[in-house]
Amino acid sequence: MMLAASPLALIAFIRFEQRRSARVGAPLVELAWFRDGRFVAGILMALAFYMLSSFYLTFSVYLQGGLHLTPLDAAFETLPFAAGFFVASLVSSNLVRCLGARALTLGFALQVIGFGAVMLVAGNILPQGLGLGLACAGLGFGTVMPCVIKVVIGGIEPRHAGPRLGS
């Protein structure tokens, strides 16, 4: 029901923002940004990235309900993901400095490869490789997570950032 109502909520929000912009001049979201293809692409990438959270619940159910692992064993199975995430988080700022927005592409590619391997193992197509797939996905997640918002809003003028503290 809520999903079906979301387009109506979006339309109502856009109209509210347009009226607020005309009346006060300070909307919550500057609608003109959505004319910038880079910003829109970044927002769509961020949306896809944050939807990844559903993986954790689904994977946990698979490990515990499907493979009949204990919660502790399921947690140990996901450690390669956490390790990859941790390592990539430490170096992601350097990657962004070197690669710019292409660091996001690299991170997403690592996630696709890693989660693809996880799917192949879960589907019994590959006999092994769950840990490697999770580590690869974790590396991608750790690359994207710290820098996705910076890359998305990097082209927005600083005046849109809001008031500065101490001003």
Image (cartoon, rainbow, N blue to C red):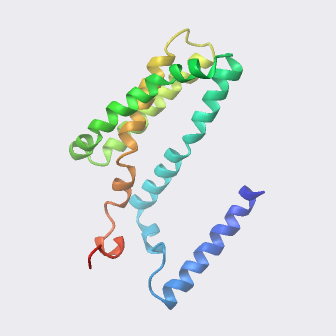
Which residue appears at 69% of the width and 16% of the height?
68
Depth check: 81 or 150 in front?
Answer: 81
Left or right, 98 with respect to 131, comes to: left
90 up-or-down from 9: above or below? above
124 up-or-down from 30: above or below? above
85 up-or-down from 149: above or below? above
165 up-or-down from 142: above or below? below
Left or right, 49 with respect to 91, comes to: right
Q: Quadrant of the N terminus?
A: bottom right
Depth check: 75 or 49 in front?
Answer: 75
Question: Which x, y percent locates residue 54?
Answer: 60, 39
Left or right, 91 with respect to 137, comes to: left
Question: Which x, y percent locates residue 31?
Answer: 48, 73
Which residue appears at 63% of the width and 68% of the height?
10
Which residue appears at 49% of the width and 14% of the height?
129
Depth check: 118 or 85 in front?
Answer: 85
Q: Quadrant of the C terminus?
A: bottom left
Question: Which x, y percent locates residue 19?
Answer: 56, 85
Instruction: Kindly indicate the quadrant of the structure image that contains residue 135.
Output: top left
Question: Which x, y percent locates residue 14?
Answer: 58, 74
Depth check: 165 or 112 in front?
Answer: 165
Extreme residue in the top direction: 127
Instruction: Kindly indicate the quadrant of the structure image that contains residue 124.
Output: top right
